[in-house]
Amino acid sequence: MSILIFLIILVVLIVVHEFGHFSIAKWAKVGVDEFAIGFPPRLWGKKKGETVYAINALPIGGYVKICGEDGASPNDPRSLASRPRLIQAAVLSGGVLCNVLLGWALISLGLMLGLPISDTAVPEPYTLAHPATVITSVSANSPAKTAGILAGDKIISVNTMRDPSISDVQRIVKDSAGGVEFIVSREKTEHSITITPEGETGKERTVGISLDRIGTLKLSFPNAIVSGFSMTTRLIWSTFSALLYIVQSLFSGTSTALDSVTGPVGLVGLVGTARGMGIIYLLSLTAIISVNLAVVNLLPFPALDGGRLLVLAVEGILRRPLPRRATEMLHMAGFAVLICIMVLITIRDIHNLF
C-alpha cells in the first residue's frame, strides 16, 4: 500500500510540475505537441487543437512536449526558441512555480483541518492545541531501536512522569540508574517499553532518539492562507540551506554529505510512516516533497530547469544562442550524473532497510 500511495504522490507532483510548463506555454501561445500522464506505451490519447492529451501505461510521472524546447526551429512562430528570453524563462520556471503553489495549498489545507507542527514553528500570535513530546527519529542500532521504539511515537509518560517535556526526558534518561520505562501512544494504542540507556549514570546517557514538542494548529481559511504562505517560504529557505550545506560538505570532502538525502526507497518508508500517523501527516509530507522538488529543480545543474535557465542567462549575456549540439550534450551528461546519484542513493536506502 505504501508503494501505491508513493506512486500516486509521485505522479501528482510530476504532473503538477509539467502542468506548470504546459499552462505558461499555452498562455504565451507557444506550441505544445503533447501532454501526457505516465510514460509509454500509450493507453489512451485524444488530440484537441494542436495538443495530444494522453494517458500512458507506466505510472511513474508524466511529461509535456513543447515545440522548440530543445532550441530547434528558431524561425517557427510556434517554437519556444523563437520567443523572447523572458518568455522562455517563464515557461521553464512554470513547473517550479506550480510545485511551490501545490506545497502552499497543501500546507494551508492542513492548517484548516488541523496541522500537527513543532512548537518552534508556530506563527504569531497562535498557540498549539494538545502539545505533546513526540519521537521524531530513532538511531539505527540504538537502545531505543532495539527496544521497539518507532518514529512518530507520542510519549505519554517516562518513569511515571506524565506528559514530560523534552528536557524532562533528557534529565530522566541521564539520571536513571537502570532501565527507563516509556509509555508511548502509537496508532491510538498505548505501549509500555523499557529502554536501558547507553553510558554512565549522571553523564552522557543516551537512548538514541530525537524529540520534538508537537501539537495541532487549526486556523480559519484566511489565516490558514497567510500562515501557509509564511510556512512555505520558510520551508523553501530551509531546503535551500540544506542543499547548500550538502554541496559545501561534498567540496570539503565530508564522507557523510549525502546521509541526509533520501531516495525513492527511503521515501516509500516515509510515506508508510506518514500514512500510519494519519492523512494530515501524509498531506504535510507531500507538501514538503513538492517544495523540495521545486528547489532542487532550480539548481543550476544541466538537465534540471535551473540548468536550462542558466544556459538561457548565458545566451542573454552573449546575445546569441549557444551551439545546440553543445547544450544537448551538456544536458545529457547532467542527466547521466543525476541517474548515477539516484542509483547510489537508492542502493544506500536499500542497505539501510536491512
Image (tube, rainbow, N blue to C red):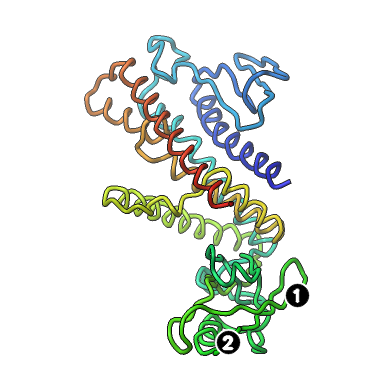
The amino acid type of the residue labelled 2 equals: Gly
Q: Residue 225: give its label.
A: none
Between residues 108 and 235, which one lies in front from this camera angle?
A: 235
- Helix, strand or loop at label 2? It is loop
Q: Is 112 situated above or below 315? A: below
Q: Mark 1: few, some, or many residues within 10 Å (few <14, many ≥20)? A: some
Residue 66, horizontal then vertical, whole percent: 50, 20
Between residues 80 and 134, which one lies in front from this camera angle?
A: 134
- Report the residue at 36% width, 35% height from top: 301
In the picture as drawn, the residue positioned furthest to the left comes out as 318
- Helix, strand or loop at label 1? It is strand
Q: Is residue 82 left or right of residue 65?
A: left
Q: Mark 2: few, some, or many residues within 10 Å (few <14, many ≥20)? A: few
Q: Which residue is mark 2?
A: 178
- Report the residue at 63% width, 39% height from top: 12
Residue 321, horizontal then vertical, whole percent: 29, 19
Q: Residue 190: give its label.
A: 1
